[in-house]
Image: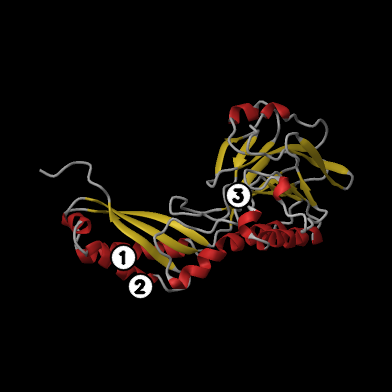
Amino acid sequence: MPNGPFRFLHASDLHLELPPHGVSEVPEHLTELFLEAPYAAAEQVFETAVAEAVEFMILSGDLLNPQFTGPRGPLFLAEQFSRLADHKIPVYWAGGAVDPPEVWPTAIRLPDNVFRFPVGRVESFAVEREGSVLASVLGVSRDRRQTIRASEFSPIAGDGITVGVIHGAADPEALRQRGLHYWALGGRHDRSTPLSGPTIVHWPGTPQGRRPSESGMHGCTVVHVDEQGRLRTSLVTTDVLRWISERLVVDDATSHDALETQLRERMHTLVETNPNADLVISWTIAGTGPLLGRLRRGPFAAELLDWLRREYGHGSPVAWSLSVDAEPSLALPP
């Protein structure tokens, strides 16, 4: 490429209106963490764009539902967009299921560096540096009745890469056949790359997991483009609250003390390998032996859970145990 390598950022599904949920109760000392997690994670996305000095940002839908965030959501985004404008970073935003362009409150003006794709037709924008085109960004905002049609996207001839931006489910093979370099997709909370080269089809997932089933790291994607126009992606974690699903195996010889030792060692490993997030952990105990029977019946599971919460649930970072369950047996006992 004439202007050398560059980077851009891809994020989606911020869902500022949706705090983490799916638990029967939230302890008082974690209430603020749960309520603020979507905004804290989203702020990390914009911080990453500045820190990585990206050429542009792509947002592929479901950033917020203003009806449920109230004024806070749009004002937060407008402030973050203005911050990017100060660093001359343009933003290309394709609306998703909850944030089509018409739901944005007219009283809050978007900065001039934000370009929103229209509903119903693909529009393209050229990203230039020193008079040369780095990328052509094609996109369309989605309404609730519209299906995604890959045939409406075609690569732009000339220098630079072509990026397609859409929200929703799509057939990766159909996207590959269109000849674009990168498909920036939204609408999934899990990170997924069904095609990785030479065409990349990518969902970055949500920056913040919302429930126990959305376990593991969440964040945004920085896309690196080299001098030959080859692309690679890298995850930048942004979640401040991380759901963890852990499975331990016991056998007939495992004692109560041995199980506590396993839990303690695994907990230390989790804290060390997730240094930048507070953890909410669901434990599953599998295997064989009398301990499993005790976990399934009586107060033993509740006692273990209470011990884990006392030992690790009030520190910094927090490692809060959500549950301790015995894995169901594959066979009935005689």
Marks 3 and 1, the one that precedes in the sequence: 3
Q: Secondary structure at mark 1?
A: helix
Name the residue tied to disc 3: 13
Q: Would residue 23 appear left or right of 190 to someone viewing this image?
A: left
Q: Is residue 276 visible?
A: no
**Disc 3 versus disc 1: distance between alpha carbons?**
33 Å
Residue 304 to residue 134: above or below: below
* Residue lying farthest to the left in this orientation: 334
Name the residue tied to disc 1: 305
Q: Position of residue 95 (x, y in %)?
A: 68, 44
Q: Would residue 291 appear left or right of 96 to someone viewing this image?
A: left
Image-quadrant location for residue 142: top right
* Residue lying farthest to the right in this orientation: 131
Identity of the amino acid at label 2? Glu
Mark identifier at residue 35: none
For the point 52% across and 67% down, which residue is it? 33
Mark identifier at residue 311: 2
Q: Position of residue 201 (x, y in %)?
A: 62, 37
Q: Position of residue 149 (x, y in %)?
A: 66, 29
